[in-house]
Image (tube, rainbow, N blue to C red):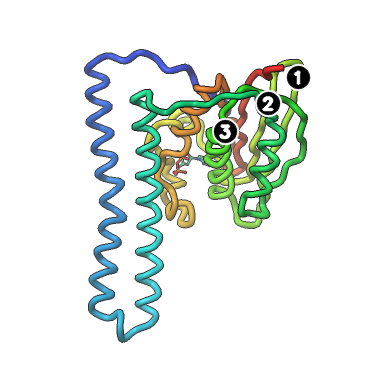
């Protein structure tokens, strides 16, 4: 199954209002879960934390995780709020895409990432934003795959067209979900129930990646089969 993101379309006032209402609902819902967990564990700490070191450890690690999730959520929301207001300035320069990718992978804190092919080429881009888009795709590829599997990155250049592929061997994405995963807060049922993914999943990474791609004339597409893995493909033009 393959899906490609499209350019943004104009929306009506009514649709804009509905979206805003849905957005406020989603944010409240997303904040309520970690806050409930934090409050529950603080109660537990107050009652038993000093007597039982196991309870203390469990409470502290759950509070830490929920706080990190909230932090990720708030950072994502701030990015998108600035983006919506046209307040996310890009500083684009010709950059060596292969070098940016290589540096990103070298600095990434997981040995499960590998690059099978790099081709020298330049694109017009803001490196900071490119890295943020790579992070969203790679975090997901690792998060939704078995912990012993590898995520492979492949690069190809044909004339002026560059293609980057992020290939995982993970849970895959159902056909009906492929276009929705780029929507804010959308998570597939499988992702919601997969424990290690649920723990740091807020449903904003791909919306941010999509925004960055659109503002670099990069097309994102997904090929995926449930149970067999996913490939996220970025395509754009070189600048030289
Ligand atoms: P999240 O923080 O939930 O990962 P994203 O916006 O990055 O949010 O992704 C949205 C949803 O798309 C995820 O919750 C998951 O259901 C699905 N998804 C994204 N990348 C992958 C992948 N590589 N494999 C399987 N599912 C994925």
User: Are the residues flagged by discs 1 and 2 in contact, CB closer than 8 Å?
Assistant: yes
Image quarter of the C terminus: top right
Q: Quadrant location of residue 184?
A: top left
Q: Earlier in the sequence, mark 1 or mark 2?
A: 1
Tell me the residue at 76%/40% (across/down).
116
Q: Quickly name the residue at label 2.
A: 163
Of the pair 81 and 205, the residue shown nearer to us: 81
The answer to whether residue 68 is left or right of residue 94 is left
User: Are the residues flagged by discs 1 and 3 in contact, CB closer than 8 Å?
Assistant: no
Mark 1–mark 3 distance (CA, rounded to whole Å):
21 Å
Q: Earlier in the sequence, mark 1 or mark 3?
A: 3
Q: Quickly name the residue at label 1.
A: 158
Q: Quadrant location of residue 195?
A: bottom left
Between disc 3 and disc 2, the foreground one is 3
Label 1 residue near ligand 1, CB within 8 Å: no
Q: Quickly name the residue at label 3.
A: 130
Mark 3–mark 2 distance (CA, rounded to whole Å):
14 Å
Mark 2 crowdedness (10 Å alpha carbons): few <14, some 14-19, many ≥20: some
The answer to whether 219 is drawn above or below residue 38 in the figure is above
Residue 114 x, y percent position in the rendering: 71, 46
Residue 216 x, y percent position in the rendering: 55, 22
The answer to whether 117 is drawn above or below residue 45 in the figure is above
> Which element carries disc 1, helix, strand or loop?
strand
Q: Quadrant location of residue 85?
A: top left
Between disc 1 and disc 3, the foreground one is 3
> What is the number of the mark on residue 72?
none
Residue 123 x, y percent position in the rendering: 65, 23
Label 2 residue near ligand 1, CB within 8 Å: no
Residue 163 x, y percent position in the rendering: 68, 26
Mark 1–mark 2 distance (CA, rounded to whole Å):
8 Å
């Amino acid at each position: 199954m393959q899906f490609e993101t499209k350019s943004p379309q104009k929306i009506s006032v009514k649709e804009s209002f509905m979206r805003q209402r849905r957005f406020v609902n989603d944010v409240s819902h997303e904040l309520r879960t970690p806050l409930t967990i934090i409050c529950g564990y603080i109660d537990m700490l107050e009652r038993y934390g000093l007597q039982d070191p196991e309870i203390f450890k469990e409470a502290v690690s759950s509070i830490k995780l929920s706080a990190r999730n909230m932090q990720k959520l708030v950072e994502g929301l701030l990015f998108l709020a600035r983006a919506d207001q046209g307040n996310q300035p890009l500083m684009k320069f010709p950059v060596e895409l292969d070098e940016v990718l290589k540096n990103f992978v070298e600095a990434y804190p997981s040995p499960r990432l590998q690059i099978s092919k790099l081709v020298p080429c330049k694109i017009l881009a803001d490196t900071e934003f490119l890295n943020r888009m790579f992070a969203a795709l790679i975090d997901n590829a690792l998060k939704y795959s078995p912990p012993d599997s590898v995520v492979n990155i492949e690069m190809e250049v044909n004339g002026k067209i560059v293609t980057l592929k992020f290939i995982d061997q993970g849970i895959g994405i159902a056909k009906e979900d492929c276009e929705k995963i780029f929507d804010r807060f959308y998570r597939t049922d499988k992702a919601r129930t997969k424990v290690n993914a649920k723990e740091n999943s807020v449903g904003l990474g791909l919306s941010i990646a999509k925004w960055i791609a659109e503002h670099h004339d990069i097309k994102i597409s997904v090929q995926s089969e449930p149970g067999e893995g996913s490939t996220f493909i970025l395509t754009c033009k070189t600048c030289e």
